[in-house]
Amino acid sequence: DSGVTQTPKHLITATGQRVTLRCSPRSGDLSVYWYQQSLDQGLQFLIQYYNGEERAKGNILERFSAQQFPDLHSELNLSSLELGDSALYFCASSADRSGRGLYNEQFFGPGTRLTVL
Amino acid sequence: KNQVEQSPQSLIILEGKNCTLQCNYTVSPFSNLRWYKQDTGRGPVSLTIMTFSENTKSNGRYTATLDADTKQSSLHITASQLSDSASYICVVSLQTGANNLFFGTGTRLTVIP
């Protein structure tokens, strides 16, 4: 158990809908990262938050957005969903104090499996 | 262009045998290299992390090596077990920049009895 929790575990929805994925980082971790992993694909970095502020953006679509709240939990919002958005979405957290993720290990949550029908 | 390439893409070995997975990268300036194990449908779990000054690091039956000159790393698994069946992902970090992680696509290892 990494200490990172994600809800829900599974999510099935229809095209055009909007969903929210939730992540609670390990206690004390300030950095939260979101990743997308499509079937048989590698991890794709989406976005990073550090202590409530956006720190880095990867290949995140404009239909997707995220935020980190004062209690450090984070939410990933996916809107106007398409079939191709079906994937595993992972959240990771690290104790990195600089927010740069240079040396601190990332601990991954169990993921949310999103299925868009 | 910063890239991480892993080989082979997939591998099947008999239980009890050893195997070696490869990771080549062009990421520069290099900060560190991590190997993760990802069971199907689960989040990745860190196995080892090495900086440029470290040649080798072990974690039980897993031994990672790093040659920063040739920009190559390997992950050696000794006396494989059925539970080693998973994807193994190589991740390389840049020294600078916030979006500084580069992921390989992984090697899918299957250990058969």
Image: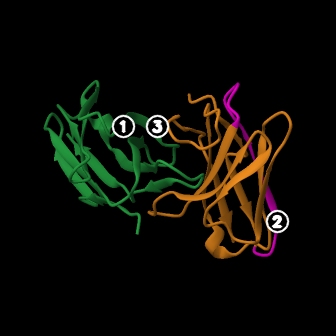
Chain colours: A orange, B green
Q: Are marks 2 and 3 on the same chain?
A: no
Task: Read off the residue under disc 3.
Answer: B45
CA separation in Å, label 3 and label 1: 18 Å
Q: Give SS at disc 1.
A: strand
Is residue A53 shown in magenta? no
Marks 3, 1: nearer the viewer: 1
Above or below — where is B18 with respect to A1?
Answer: below
Look at the numbered disc 3 and give the secondary structure of its residue.
strand
| Residue at mark 2 to residue at mark 3: CA–CA distance | 30 Å
In space, the residues marked 1 and 2 are separated at their CA atoms by: 41 Å
Q: Residue B51 carries which label?
A: 1
**Magenta stretch in the rendered image:** A15-30
Q: Which residue is drawn at 66% across and 29% down?
A: A26
Image quadrant where one finds the C terminus of chain A? bottom right
Q: Do the residues labelled 2 and 3 touch (CB within 8 Å)?
A: no
Q: Residue at x 69, y 34 (%)?
A: A25
